[in-house]
Amino acid sequence: MTTAQALPHGINLQDPRLFMNDQAHDAFRVLRAEAPVHWNPGTEQLNGFWSVTKYADILQVSRHPELFISSKGIAGSGLRALDATGTQANQGNVSIITMDPPRHVKMRRLVNKGFTPRAVNAMEPQIRQVTNEILDGIAGRSSCDFVLDVSSQLPLAVICGMMGLERDVWPLMFELTNSVLGSGDPEYQADVPEEERGSGEAARRTAMMGRMRMVEYFREVLERRRREPGTDLPSILLESEVDGEKLTEGDILAFCFLLILAGNETTRNAISGGLVAFSQFPEQKRRLLNDWSLVESAVEEICRWTSPLHHMSRVATADTEIRGQRIAAGDRVIMWYPSANRDEEVFADPYTFDITRDPNEHLAFGIGEHFCLGAGFARKEIRVMFEELFRRFPNIEVTAPPDRLRSNFINGIKHLQVAY
Ligand code: HEM
C-alpha cells in the first residue's frame, strides 16, 4: 500500500460538490502542474487511489489493459468494506466494460456489427426524424428545460430503439438510468426518506434499487425475446456464443444494463454541455451557422470541452511506475478525462472552445481496448441534434446556470433552462 501525500491546496476529488459547482477544472489545473500522479488516501468508507491527470499518463494506463485492469471496477475508488472481503461494488454480473482480455474482445465482437460506421450511417435518417419529432414537441413554446425536453430524449430513443424497447417504457429507462448513475444526487433519491437524502447510504440504496428494478425489467424482456426473437440487441445476445458456449442470463443482463446506461447518460450531457458552450462562446455559434462544413470538428470540440465522463479507473496488477511515481500492485488508478482534455502540453489554448480545433485528439471516449463502443452513435446524435436545433431555433439561448449533477463520475446536467 502506498503512503499518503498532502493534498495540494486541500483538493479533494472525492467531493462531488467540486464537480457540482463546476470547479473541477481549477483543481485539475493545479494537479497537472504540481502533482500530476497524486495519491489520494481515501476516507473511512472509500479506498485511496492515484489520480492521473496528464494526457500522456492516461494513454499509458489505457494502453496496458493487462497491467491496469478493469475487472475490479471502473467507477470511483470502491468501498473499503467490500474490498476487504475481496469483492467489488461492480461484482456480480460482468459486462464488457469491467472485463479484461482475452474474454473482453470476444464479448465485444458479439455486438460490434451494430455499432460500425455503416450501421451508424444507416440509422441517420431515423436519428434525424426522431430529432425533429423532439423539436416539434418544444416548437409551440418559447422556453423549456432543454435536458428533460430535448437532450435526454434523443439518446434515449436511439438506444431504446436498438434494444427493441417499446416507447411506453422509455420514461422508465430514463428514471432508472438516473437512479443508477446519478444515485449520489438527492434529486434522484426518491425511494429514500427526505431527511436521509444526500448521504452515502442514500446513494447506495438508490443505486441498488435502480439496479434491481432494471434486472426485473430486463428479465421480462429476455423472457419475451426467447419466445419471439427479433433483430434487436437482446435477441442477438440470446443467440450468441463465446468459445462454443451460450452466454448466461447474467452475462446478457449485464450487457443490456451497460448499453442502456452508457447509451443514455453520456450523449445527453454532451448535447446539453455543447449548448452551454455555444452560449458562452457566441462567436463560435455564429461561425457554425455561417459554415456548416465545420460541424464535424464542432462535434469533436463539444466532446473535448464537455468530457461527459469525469473518470474511469483501473487497478494495477503488478508494481509499476507512472511518470516516475511508484504504483504498487493492487493500487487503484483513476484517469480524469476532463483534465487530459485541457492538458496544456497537448491542446493549444485549452480553455477556449474552438470549433475549428485541429488536431483534436481528445480522450472523451477513452482510448485503447475499451474505447467507447457507442462513439459513432454519440457523434452522429450530437451532429444531427445541433444541425436541426440551430436550423429551427438559431436564437436559442441558455437563460440560467446549468443545474449540475452531484457526481464525480458523470459530468451531468440535470436541468438547463433555455429560451428561443
Ligand atoms: C458523448 C457520449 C459518450 C461518451 C463521452 C462515452 C465515453 C465512454 C468512455 C470514456 C468509455 C471507456 C471506458 C473505459 O475505458 O473503461 C466508454 C465505453 C463504452 N461506451 Fe461510451 N460514451 C458515450 C456514448 C456511448 C453510447 C451512445 C453508447 C451506446 C450506444 C456507449 C457505449 C459504451 C460501451 C458499451 C462501452 C464499453 C466498451 C468496452 O469496454 O469495450 N457509449 N464510453
Image (tube, rainbow, N blue to C red):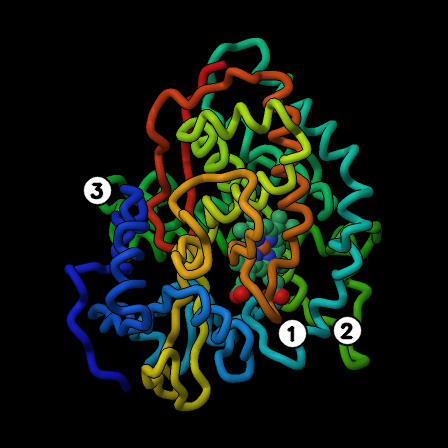
Q: Secondary structure at mark 3?
A: helix
Side of 387 where 225 appears, left or right: right
Q: CA distance from mark 3 to mark 2?
A: 46 Å
| Residue type, label 2 | Lys
Instruction: Compare residues 24 and 232 and report the one nearer the observer.
Output: 24
Can the viewer see residue 169?
no
What residue is pinned by disc 2?
246
Q: Does the numbered disc 2 mark a residue whose Cβ is under 8 Å from ligand 1? A: no
Q: Does the numbered disc 1 mark a residue whose Cβ is under 8 Å from ligand 1? A: yes
| Residue type, label 3 | Glu
Q: Residue at x 39, y 88 (%)?
A: 329
Instruction: Compare residues 334 and 80 and report the one nearer the observer.
Output: 334
Q: CA distance from mark 3 to mark 1?
A: 42 Å
Residue 195 image label: 3
- Percent position of residue 369, x then y: 61, 71
Q: Residue at x 42, y 68 (%)?
A: 89
Residue 104 image label: 1
Image quarter where ligand 1 lies: bottom right
- Percent position of residue 49, x then y: 32, 73
